[in-house]
Amino acid sequence: MRRTSSPTLVVIVLASSLFVVTSSEFQVAAMLTAMSADLGAPVADLGLLVTVYSLGMGCGGPVVAWALRRLRPRRALVLVMACYAVAEALAGATSETNLLIPLRLVAGALSGATFGMALSTGMRLSDERGRARMSAGVLTGLMAGTLLGLPLSHVLATTVGWRASFVVLAAAAAAMALAVRLAVPEAPGRSGERPASLGALRNGHLWLRYLTSFLTIGGAFTAFTFIDPLLQRAGLTAPQATLTMFGFGASAFTVNHLAGRVPAGAARGWLVSGVIAQLAALLVFLLAPGLSPLIVTATVFLGGAGIALNPLLVNRVITVGEPNVLVNTVHTSAITLGVAAATTLGSRAITVTGDLGGTVLVGLAFSVAAVLITATTRGGDPLGPSRDRAGRP
């Protein structure tokens, strides 16, 4: 007999899984100084751990999803979270930088797969109308991990040591594997359903949606990554900057919740509006860097754009592609690679220009491109009634 579970509990468990892997994504950045002192390795060398994790997410996530394509999403998620716990535990136990690098690469690949599997599990347990709301609920874990992962890891590193962060997240990942196994029902298979194949990705419309996500989230992260120095440049004190960041977070959670209620046919208009708000915020950072009231307002607006638009981006993807693990994992990879590309270009732009405005310019370029692509792509299913999801007449 198939097990039933509260939809709210399912969302909490799946969102918590994303919270764990997102927190792990940011943990090394919060502990570089402590790790450098303990391991006797330069900070610049340890910074490579952040890079390989991102590469693992962007490139390894789809590989893991493909390897586990014959498993149902929930079962695959349990396996991936269990493996993630092992990778985190081993990272906390080793004292060799050369071992940390492959462990972080593996953890990144498992993290990328976790996103696709958590989203696919939630979507398969929802009807078509409820998928956007389910994805928004699950993605609150991403939001929480993005906002809390850095400070939580920093607190652990400075109080009980950097290894504790890996141990805590390893235990959390193991607990989430058990929670998914016990609390999340396995969605029934569809009649004649076959494992996800690469054919699901042979869709030009789908790749346009991936590109929009790449540009939108990448554009937001060019400012989000440097938000602390941007607020300091505006003359905000440490307590004022903290309150402003809370405003960023409140705005992000609110818009994320609202975005999950947007019907598929209206997602395009909302997304264009959200990216325009992102453009406005970035322009304030560029043109009025020293006006603290405007910078505070722009930060709150940025919170309501960027990562808060994830439910709309997911909604747009599933209107042209099947909501399976491979499609969702490649979408996660597109977002991750967008963040990596934008922040790399932003850092380089700061070096070239000698000013934080360089990274803001990169964000503006990404955001303008996102608006143009979204505005010229029809809402809903652009393939029309005469074509199937692979784009064939």
Image: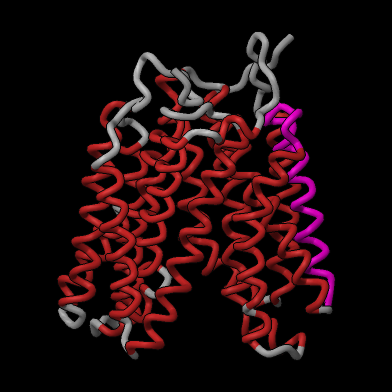
Quarter of the image holding residue 155? bottom right
* Residue 371 coordinates in the image, percent (x, y): 26, 50
Residue at 19 percent of width and 68 percent of height: 283
Residue at 70 percent of width and 46 percent of height: 63
Residue at 60 percent of width and 55 percent of height: 58
Q: Is residue 314 above or below residue 155?
A: above
Please state, as top left, top right, bottom left or bottom right, where the N terminus lies in the image.
top right
Q: Is residue 13 visible?
A: no
Residue at 28 percent of width and 80 percent of height: 357
Q: Is residue 189 left or right of residue 295?
A: right
* Residue 35 coordinates in the image, percent (x, y): 69, 82
Q: Is residue 315 left or right of residue 374?
A: right
Quarter of the image holding residue 343? bottom left
Report the predominant secondary structure element of the magenta stretch: helix
Q: Is residue 181 above or below residue 376?
A: above
Q: Is residue 264 left or right of residue 77?
A: left
Quarter of the image holding residue 314? top left
Asked if the stretch drawn in magenta spans residue 377, the answer is no
Asked if the stretch drawn in magenta spans residue 87, the answer is yes
Query: What is the basis of the colouring in this image?
Result: secondary structure
Please state, as top left, top right, bottom left or bottom right, where the C terminus lies in the image.
top left
Q: Which residues are magenta?
A: 68-95
Name the foreground residue: 208 vs 359. 208
